[in-house]
Amino acid sequence: MSDQNSHEHPSVATYLKIAVILTVVTAVEVALYYVPEFGLLAPTLLVLSAAKFALVVMFYMHLKPDNKLFTNIFWPPLLLATGVILALMALLGNW
Amino acid sequence: MSTAATAHYTSTGLDTRKIAFWAFIGSECLLFGSLIATYLSYEGKSVVGPYPGEILDIPLTSISTFVLLMSSLAMVLALDGVTKGDNKQARIWLATTVLFGAIFLGFQAYEFQHFVHNGLTLSTNLFGSTFFVLTGCHGLHVLGGVIWLSSLLIQSYRNKLGPDKAMTVEIAGLYWHFVDVVWIVIFTVVYLIQRG
């Protein structure tokens, strides 16, 4: 039987680059928090947070090089959870 | 032990433990999704203080967030060591991951103690109830991860964590990184985007 598990993991250099990006993005997020009267704070922070989330999932959790079945197992409940958050906020009128 | 007993392959050629673990992570998405939904739905609706803006410590939590992010880097370096059969590398980075996880828990324990000292408990207001349940549930997951990774570290010291155990370490890593990504979301929606 072929071993579908033996995918190519990212290199140590890639892991380090991702760590640097995560650190810089987090620093930017915290800096934005202290910018007074920054009108687009919430959407900007959500986009940056989603980018960090995607980087960890794709490279540290190996979803990018791994078998697509794992991606297909992960995304539906993630989308459902996001839908639950949006639906409950809408139902309780707390946008 | 025979290969069949250790490999756990399915007709897809994928490891059953890894498939099951991704399904578990999917269920965890729903758990944390519902807790985050509850927090956001009641955010800004507390009728008595302390309110988030009065009590959340952004500099302190930024440091603990950085520590947890770096623990994920340590975890992938530990997996890299196990995969290559480099026991020393695996040991150093597993120990680093455990240490960073413990430091994160220390920050959280300090934060909780500080909040209680300032009058915010589970029953003070809606913010206290939803905040402690959400971050406490995440903290318990971190604690579970620290215990799990500590057991792997002990196995490493007993020279029982060779390349044949790479999948075991990878699955533990999946759990650890998931705990990390959940915190990425919590840090943003609870700490940085405050609406009340």
Image (tube, coloured by chain):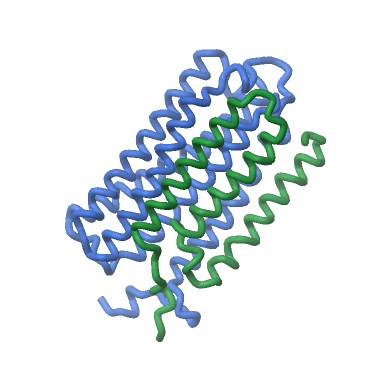
Chain colours: A green, B blue
Q: Nearer the viewer, residue A6 or B34?
A: A6
Q: Nearer the viewer, residue B55 or B48?
A: B55
Quarter of image, res B121: top right
Query: Which image quarter is the C terminus of chain B in?
Result: top right
Q: Position of residue B104 (x, y in %)?
A: 40, 34
* Figure check: A13 above or below B1: above
Q: Position of residue B86 (x, y in %)?
A: 21, 61
Quarter of image, res B190: top right
Residue in view at x 44 percent, y 67 percent: B17
Q: Nearer the viewer, residue B57 or A3?
A: B57
* Figure check: B7 above or below A16: below
Q: Nearer the viewer, residue A47 or B12?
A: A47
Q: Position of residue B88 (x, y in %)?
A: 19, 54
Residue in view at x 43 percent, y 43 percent: B69
Residue in view at x 41 percent, y 72 percent: A7
* Figure check: B19 above or below B4: above
Name the side, left or right, on which A38 lies relative to B74: right
Name the side, left or right, on which A74 lies relative to A40: left
Residue in view at x 48 percent, y 29 percent: B61
